[in-house]
Amino acid sequence: MRDIVYIVEKEIVDKMNCIVTVQSFVGNVLSVCNQKWASTEKKVTDHLGNEYTITEVSHEDSTITLAPVGAWTFSGTTLLLNKPTFFVGTPTATNSEWTLFSSDERNKVPFIWMVEPTRESVLSENSTIERRSDLRIVFLDSSNFQQWLTMDTHDNRLQALYYMVDEFIRVIRSNSIFFSDEMTHEIVNFTKFGKETAQGFEKNIIDANLTGIDLKITVSVLHGCSGC
């Protein structure tokens, strides 16, 4: 039986579509079909490999504004977003691994964290479903608590993470190794990802100022597919 962490990484995260389709543009203001997880201050590239920094994302009119890293202006039909970094483990282990991954936070956000342990129900060999895996997946990105109001965090980070969750779910539903006809999921958003008490925010779970969406979902893996 294939370890569920490899199924999540290879069959879901690695198959997420990181390409944003550009419908039209005026200068460096791009009209797009779906911003996906494009968000301010992030680097993106065009089809020629030219690099840009996102300066503004408007979810109302579906536009992305770029600042070129160089002398060029945008001229293309697609933007390539960074694929989210994938981590797996308990909170303590993930915090340690995430911290050591890079000294530059920009190299490790946004990221997708598969929280362990994972509980799975294994079905009989007569069932078309091999197992049902109860997953907790957290989608996280950097935030600016010192300067942003709560609505700024929604505009600049959380909306992008909602789109990332949408893409994660889309991949599951389109992948034939999963039975997803009756699949449901639960999400909780965190403008400030950490532990809170009745007295207010207590401490970060990961040693950084992060915004996140916590996804709980049960995926059904079909028999004969977990080894594909």
Image (spheres, rainbow, N blue to C red):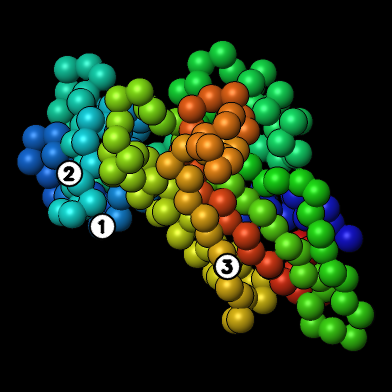
Residue 107 x %, y %: 50, 24
Can residue 150 be seen? Answer: yes
Q: Nearer the viewer, residue 192 or 170?
A: 192
Task: Please give left or right for residue 216 compared with residue 116 in the image.
Answer: left
Q: Residue at x 15, y 54 (%)?
A: 61
Of mark 1 and mark 3, the one earlier in the sequence is 1
Q: How many marks?
A: 3
Residue 95 x %, y %: 67, 28
- Local packing at callout 3 (Cα closer than 10 Å; few below 14, some 14-19, many 20+) is few
Label number found at residue 33: 1
Q: Residue at x 91, y 80 (%)?
A: 124
Can residue 224 be seen? Answer: no
Q: Is residue 7 above or below residue 176?
A: above
Residue depth check, mark 2 versus mark 3: number of the one nearer the observer: 3
Determine whether the residue tagged by mark 1 lies in a helix, strand or loop: loop
Q: Nearer the viewer, residue 70 or 107?
A: 107
Residue farthest toward the bottom in the current orientation of the protein: 126
Identity, as a three-letter code, of the amino acid under mark 1? Cys
Q: Nearer the viewer, residue 222 or 41?
A: 41
- Local packing at callout 1 (Cα closer than 10 Å; few below 14, some 14-19, many 20+) is few
Question: Quadrant of residue 55 in the image?
Answer: top left
Identity, as a three-letter code, of the amino acid under mark 3? His
Residue 148 x %, y %: 30, 31
From the image, tell me which residue sits under label 2: 30
From the image, tell me which residue sits under label 3: 185
Residue 200 x %, y %: 51, 37
Of mark 2 and mark 3, the one earlier in the sequence is 2
Identity, as a three-letter code, of the amino acid under mark 2? Leu
**Position of the N terminus by quadrant:** bottom right
**Position of the C terminus by quadrant:** bottom right
